[in-house]
Image (cartoon, grey):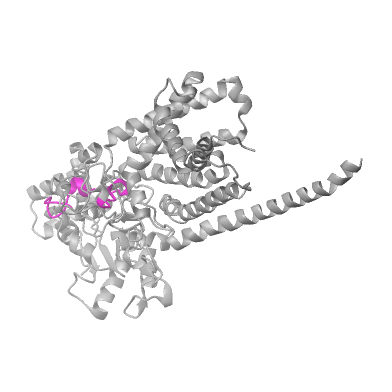
Amino acid sequence: MFQHKDDTVLEALQRRGVTRRDFIKMSILLAGALGLDYKRVGAVTHALETAKRAPVIWLEFQDCAGCTESISRSQNPTLEKLVLNDITIEYHETLMAAAGYQAEEAKQAAMETYKGQYILVVEGSIPLANGGYCTIGGRAADDILREAAANAFAVVAVGNCASFGGIPRANPNPTDAYGVMELVTDKPVINIPGCPAIPEAMTNTIANILVLGSIPELDALNRPKLFYAQTVHDRCLRRGFYDAGLFADSFGDDGYQNGYCLYKLGCKGPTTYNTCASLKWNEGTSWPVEAGHPCLGCSEPNFWDGGGFYQGASAPLQKPDLVTVGGAALVGAVVAGGVAGLNSAAKKRAAKSEKAEQPSDKEA
Amino acid sequence: MTPESAMQFVRGPLFYFAVLFFIAGMTYRLIGVLALGWKKDLVQPRHSKLGGALVAYLKGVIIWPFIPRINETAGRNPVTYLAGGLFHLGLFLTIFLGAAHMLVWKSLLGFGWPTLPLPVIDALAAIAIISLIVLALNRVMSPVLRLLTRSSDYFNLLFVFLPMFTGFFLTHRLFAPYDSMFTLHVLTVDILLIWIPLSRISHFMFYFYTKARQGVKFAQRGARP
């Protein structure tokens, strides 16, 4: 399996029968996909010619394999092929043919061989409660993660679960789920949140690390700025309707049929940073808001508990019910009544003492 | 505290507390005034008391403020009249007819209503902000007003200014990303909700009460002990 471990990416490609012409094409495409200037195609070519082919180890914990489904439908087949086949994913429970001890051995061998070089991709959240609700081969998820992260070059957390805990972390969070960046603090962790993550964002980030050997520019939540610098709202095709005050008030009404803004139906676009509106999904076919559904905010932390999906983005997350409001009013009324009672008693006392003094006035 | 957890906090527990504090505080204020002590009303009213209250509302709330000639404040202090009026108008239309604000009411009350387009709300918000700046300058510059002003009045101005500014910056994407400014906006609203019962901004509740009392007195038209 590792007989060509010192291969460069180019050598690995040549071994697969990729021609020089195809290789240059791939470099150009890759440079474009990485958001590089055309002048830097040469740099990409050079990197692919000289960089050691480094593998990806893909771990799955509390996940639904949706991000794996997503990356396998990347709209950029060359880039996908590059990441999945040519750069190689050495270990991926869903995609690999091996199973059981054989698979675990392959992972251990890859981790040993490519110590400090491999990219660790994590999909799914990591539970800490009860010694780990999620175990693979008898080992707890956080144990597996820490071992794999220890010798990784960088860790990429794909999907909202691996980035921020996602759905497993939603209230009441029975498994005490965590995102990778909360557990791995001594390695660069790159988050590609989304439910699922956008395939191009995943392949691009992995390719960026492998080809350029560097971590892409990240925002405050460790998300690559290339994909997460702008809100969904900023790039939304319905944005003009928002500015003009034209909204759909319910699913299927006139405004909805006219394609008006979905803000009043609970769209979280204004507070959600992601690139859905630009890249779209399924080879650029469409994306949720274009298809008529408000944005759920799936690339933001706590999106599952961040207010109802169909409640306005501005709506409060906690609101007192009628009984609590009544209770608060009662507290106010009781305190006011008490103060008024004391006041009234003081007035009566004053009136009494005034009356008591009056006769003495007359006598005098 | 991450930016995200800050937003969760101001929209969640802090908002919850602020609303309850506001309700308890305002009930305290109102009951406190109502329970100040009433003397038995021995005067036979000439006209209906309810009618008097309604007329007072009609004149004081709906008609007089909009007719400068008749409204005394307009002649004596045009700045207070004009800026004060525009401030309240802009503020309340923004609070109730802005799309984002309506959604807050909808989540609290369970029902919504049509809203105004963003550019209109934007203009109203700008008018309210400019009016409040004018009122603040007037308060600082007028020697009479300065004598009547205490530090709490400056706090009133500050705590009303902050949600208005952050809200305006929010819609225009100024100075900070949308979500950070959104957090600040909700935070300042929470602070305002807590501050209102402690301050004279609670006048909006007493205003209607006072007008009704005045109307009743006017309806009696009799000699009072």
Can see residue A314?
no
Name the foreground residue: A55 vs B92: B92
What is the chief secondary structure element of the magenta stretch?
loop
Let me know if residue B139 is in the magenta part: no
Can see residue A8?
yes
Q: Could you tell me residue A243's position as x and y percent?
A: 25, 37
Q: Could you tell me residue A196's position as x and y percent?
A: 24, 60
Name the foreground residue: B39 vs B199: B39
Q: Quadrant of the C terminus of chain A?
A: top right
| Highlighted range, magenta | A265-287
Q: Could you tell me residue B110's position as x and y percent?
A: 33, 55
Image quadrant of residue A310? bottom left
From the viewer's perspective, tell me whether residue B9 is left or right of residue A92.
Answer: right
Q: Please, is residue A290 above or below residue A196 in the view? A: above
From the viewer's perspective, tell me whether residue A64 is left or right of residue A19.
Answer: right
Image quadrant of residue B131? top left
Name the foreground residue: A138 vs A252: A252
Considering every residue shown, the one lying at the far right of the view is: A364
Name the foreground residue: A353 vs A223: A353
Q: Could you tell me residue A119's position as x and y percent?
A: 29, 60
From the viewer's perspective, tell me whether residue A112 is left or right of residue A251.
Answer: right
Let me know if residue A284 is in the magenta part: yes
User: Number of marks in the image?
Assistant: 0
Q: Please, is residue B163 above or below residue B81 in the view? A: below
- Residue beneath the point at 89% across and 45% down: A360
Q: Quadrant of the N terminus of chain A?
A: bottom left
